[in-house]
Image (spheres, rainbow, N blue to C red):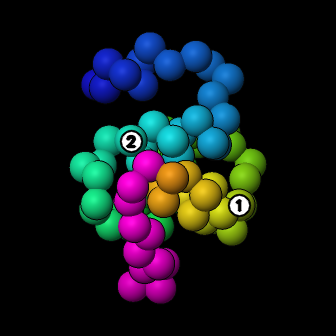
Amino acid sequence: MNLWTDCRPDKVTAKQLVHELILQAPRGQIISVKDTIAAVRRDGPNLVESDCALVELIVEIAPAVGLFVGFDLRE
């Protein structure tokens, strides 16, 4: 049971989820695209965004908060 996700509004966007997940990482770390997409799919099972759209959000948000992006989808 995750208190943060249990208190989240019903209408959460993919951008909000990606932002929440990215903010949990310490600055200067590498964000895994594969793990972030999996977490978004887990926390927002009804979202319709494609994996490509989620990658775009990750690439947009992560560097803005001091993180690097690891493109590990094929691993």
| Residue at numbered disc 2 | 23
The crowd level at tag 2 (other Cα within 10 Å; few <14, some 14-19, many 20+) is some
Single out the mark in the foreground, 2 or 1.
2
SS at mark 2 in the image: helix
69, above or below 53, in the image: below
Residue 13 in percent (x, y) is at 66, 35
Q: Nearer the viewer, residue 62 or 4?
A: 62
Residue visible at 45% across and 37% down? 20
70, above or below 61, in the image: below
Residue 35 in percent (x, y) is at 39, 62
| Residue at numbered disc 1 | 53
Task: Tell me which segment is drawn in magenta.
Answer: 65-75
Residue 6 in percent (x, y) is at 42, 18
Res 27 label: none
Residue visible at 47% across and 78% down? 71
33, above or below 22, in the image: below
Let me know if residue 72 is in the magenta part. Answer: yes
